Image: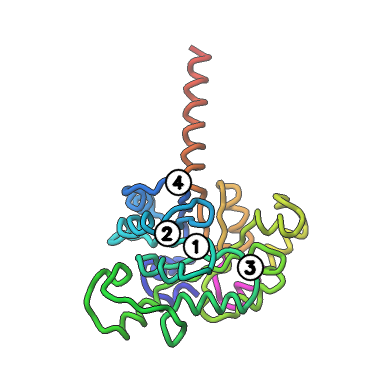
Amino acid sequence: MLENKTGVLSTKAEKGYLSGMMVFEFFVPGMPALAASTGADFLLYDMEHTGISIETLKLQMAACRGLDIAPLVRVPSVEANTIGQILDIGAHGVMVPMVDTADQAKDIVKRAYYPPEGQRGTAFSIAHDDYKPGIPAEKMAQANQRSIIIAMIETKTGLANVEAIAAVEGIDVLWLGHFDLTSSMGIPGQTDHPDYLAAVSRIVAAATQYRKSAGYMAVDKKWAEEYWGYGFRMLAYGLDHLLLRASLADGIKFISNMAVND
C-alpha cells in the first residue's frame, strides 16, 4: 500500500485516499502552488497526449519542490530511458500507459527502481536528490522507497492479466483508463455497459487482493462519487483546461442571463 512508502504521498495516504488533478495545458510556474493551496495531494502531468518536453517538466518539478504536493508524470511509453529521466528530474512517481502483462510490469519496475530492486541508472546530486551530497547507497534506498509506480489497465489484454500485473512487487497503483479500455473492448465510451462495469469490479478486486491502490480520473463530482463507490481511492479530479472551461462557461452563462433579464 502507498502508506508503506515514504515522502509526500505516503503521509497523505494515511487518511485513506489521495486526490489531485491531471495537467494537460497549464505548465506555468504557479500551477504547483495553486494546486497545493486547494489541498490537492498530487499533480499528474501528462506526456502521452500533450507533447510536453522533459525540459518543461523539469521546471514544473522544481516548482513543486518544498510544497506539500507530489509531482507525478504519465510517460508516453517505456521506450528508451524515459522513466529514469522523469524520476531524475524530480518526479515522485510515474504512470505508464497500456500495461498488458506481468512481464511489462516487471520491466517498468526494473526501469524505475535502483538496484537491487531494479536497474535504474545512477546519478546523484541532481534534481531527484535536491542536489545534495550524500552516500549513494542511502540515496538509492530513499528513492526506491519514495517512487510511486502506476500501471494503467486500459486494454482487454491488460484486463485479462490484471491480477498478475497487480501481483508484481513494485507496482503501487492500478489505474483504470476508461476510454481506452472501452475502445479495446469494442464498446467505446459505454461506461454503463455491463462488461465494462464487470471490468471495473475486477480491477478494484485485483488491487484489493494484492494491497495496491485503485486509481481513476473523474471528470466531475458525479463520476468522483460513482468511482469512489466502486472502491477507487486515488482520484484525479478533472483536467486543468476542462476545469477552467467549465468554470468560465458557468460564469459566462450567468452574465448572459443577467443581460437577458436586465
How many other residues sit within 10 Å of disc 2, few (<14), some (14-19) or many (≥20)?
A: many
Q: Which residue is mark 4?
A: 25
Amino acid type shown at disc 2: Phe
Foreground label between 3 and 2: 2
Q: Which of the marked residues, 1 or 3, is nearer the chain's N terminus?
A: 1
Q: Which residue is mark 2?
A: 42
The residue positioned 34% from the left and 50% from the top of the image is 37
Q: Earlier in the sequence, mark 4 or mark 2?
A: 4
Percent coordinates x, y for residue 150 in the rendering = 52, 68
Residue 205 at x, y percent in the picture: 65, 71
Asked which secondary structure carries label 4, the reply is: loop
Q: Is residue 100 magenta?
A: no
Q: Which residues are magenta?
A: 203-214
In the image, residue 41 sits, relative to residue 206, either above or below, namely above
Residue at label 3? 204
Q: Are marks 4 and 2 in contact (CB under 8 Å)?
A: no
Asked if marks 1 and 3 touch (Cβ < 8 Å), the reply is no
Whether tag 4 and tag 1 are in contact, CB under 8 A, the answer is: no
- Determine whether the residue tagged by mark 3 lies in a helix, strand or loop: helix
Q: Check residue 83 in the rendering and tell me which mark sits there, or answer none.
A: none
User: For the residues marked 2 and 1, what is the alpha-carbon distance in whole angstroms?
Assistant: 16 Å
Q: Amino acid at mark 1?
A: Val
Residue indicated by mark 1 = 75
Q: Please tell me whether mark 2 or mark 1 is closer to you in this view.
A: 1
